[in-house]
Amino acid sequence: MAGYAMSIAAQTRADSTDSIRHLDEVVVTSKLTFREVIPSQKLSGEQLAKLNTHSVADALRYFAGLQLKDYGGVGGIKTVNIRSMGTNHLGIYYDGVELGNAQNGQIDLGQFSLDNVDEVTLYNGQKSAIFQTASDFGHAGSVYIRTRRPWFSYGETHHAHFNVKYGSSDMIRLSGVYEQKLTDRLSASFSGGFVNASGKYKFRYRRVNVDGTTAWDTTAVRQNGDIHAERLEANLHGVLDEGYWSVKGYFYNSERGIPGAIVNNVWKRGERQWDLNTFWQAQWQKSFSDRFSSRAMAKYAFYRTRYINRDSTQLPVDNTYYQQEWYLTTSHVYEILPNWSASLSYDLRWNKLNATPYGFAYPTRLSNLVAVATAVDYTRVKLQASLLASIIKDHTRKNGGQPTLTRWTPAFFAHFYPLKSRIWSLRAFVKRSFRMPTFNDLYYTDMGNAYLKPETATQYDIGMVLRKSWTSGLLRHVALQADGYYNTVKDKIIAYPKGQQFRWTMLNLGSVHIHGVDIEAEADLQPLPGLTVTGRVQYTYQDARDVTDPSTPYYRDQIPYIPWHSGSAILGLAYKGFDLNYSFIYAGKRYNEQENIIYNHMEPWYTNDISLSYGFKRKKTTYKLTLEVNNLLSQDYDVIVNYPMPKRNYVAGIKIEY
């Protein structure tokens, strides 16, 4: 095996008719190579650019095994759930460093634009490399977001692109990237974005009684869904002898309305939210020999969230929350034998949450994570094993130090190639992971429970991959992935009514058993010279049952918002600068409450999106014009009950790059 390879800057530039291709400026920091062992899905480069997507959350809709919670509109909160285990079991990594939220454990992926993103990858289990941070070993699944890294051909010193889009809901979206070569070993990049929208869109609110009669059937305009947001990012990239380093600064600021649920004939809410998210992160990596490499990362993050509720039917609320995080990590990999490597990683994380509500607990959390891993990579067999030790201690102003929690979570992965051609492979893994209760779960005023135990997840997966490419003929590339899995979640944390006046508290009451199948297929065709056809489909089956208590009416019922069947399809045609792309997303029937009764039933929904773009070049400047139509058939649907999604909507844009 060998662990990791990093190419600092590489670019192949050639016309499709050229017989010679030129490779510029390649710097390899280690002979340790990256080999996939773990089920993954990826969208990168042109695939992302051609989809009707504006945020990372939009792109993740096309991955098998993920369920997106979308509350609607340009500024609606968007979170993602992996294989029915919950949002908090999914790690989100931005250029190699985890995005955290100790307050509620949920990352709003709608805040991260795709304008500066080169690749989004989903791993079930963990990343296919033992040279990684300790926290990478701790999640049931991970999403890795990789942003653009500057590259320069001979004689080039800078690049820039500018993108402007205007669309329905009075949406205007501006973004730009500037890249500058400072020296042969140092480059800088700056990116920024701005979005403003009224958030208004027409929707149809229709509800049918159990007996089939119509309870409501009204067309209205969504209110209080406006957003104003700015994003800035700055990067420095440096090349070392047999290594590299980088520094990143990130800033996001937004104000948005929260339109709320359409219930009790209330069409407009008085809720608003302000978010200020900033972080600085740095990383350094170097190979000291062909057999030993080290990496170090550091991060400081500050998040401020203000929430107000001026709804006259409820008690007024005006609360502000302040999060801080310090994070340090170091990782080392050593090649014991040519086909056998081992790694050691250590993470130190400190989180603090302050807030303005009376009686707040002011919690802090200190986390120490240590991971050891080993990998064997022979010609037709790849094996990986890891063990993570997590030592976590909380402290609150009211109750002082809490008991130290220690967890050991192992994982084992195998990948086998039955044929010498390596076009077909089999894989399997088993992994134990857990997620700590969030600060809200433990310490939220009048609701938290300081004695909660962590949720524990166990995953079993077996799958196969078929992949083959051709240099001529109609079919140029085909790939098929299929995985069957069984997951269990114990001590699931839920909000439960308890005590007088129907007050709620957080309890470990849940146990969920999940059976599922993920299938993904893609193909590239070239039916005519200059005409390229690409296709990608994915399908997910999930049976996720609540097996907590046989005496409850929802015992062995499907858990809320998990459809049995879901999937997506993408079809693209490219010809002489024109790109026509069609995408389809489907979610089958599901239930919005624990009991699977007709009153809680939600009908299947689907959307059809289409886009047409034309790109052309004048001298050194490239122009690209785009027109998008989303929800082409103007279907009325909710992803979350009583949060209606937009009907047919449009976006037009132009991108200029030089």
Image: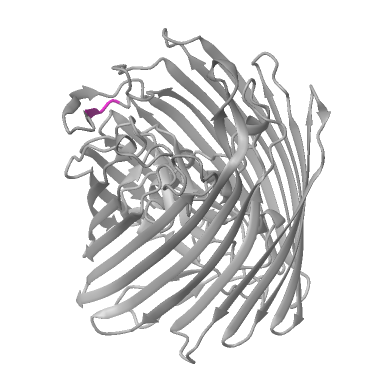
- How has the structure been colored for display? one colour
Q: Quadrant of the N terminus?
A: bottom right
- Seen at 60% across and 72% down, the residue is 34
**204 falls in the magenta region:** yes
| Viewer-nearest residue: 560 or 102 | 560
Q: Residue 371, located in which quarter of the rendered image?
A: bottom right
- Seen at 28% across and 59% down, the residue is 569
Vertical placement of 630 versus 207: above or below?
below
- Whole-percent x and y of residue 643? 34, 31
| Viewer-nearest residue: 115 or 387 | 387
Q: Farthest residue in the top direction?
A: 312
**89 falls in the magenta region:** no
* Residue 7 in view in this figure: no
Please give left or right for residue 344 compared with residue 529 in the image.
right
What secondary structure is the stretch in magenta mostly built from?
A: strand
* Residue 586 in view in this figure: yes
- Whole-percent x and y of residue 536? 31, 65
- Whole-percent x and y of residue 227? 40, 26
Vertical placement of 73 versus 561: above or below?
above
Q: Farthest residue in the front direction?
A: 551
- Whole-percent x and y of residue 539? 34, 61
Q: How many marks?
A: 0
Range of the magenta residues?
Answer: 200-206
Q: Residue 278, located in which quarter of the rendered image?
A: top right
- Seen at 31% across and 57% down, the residue is 568
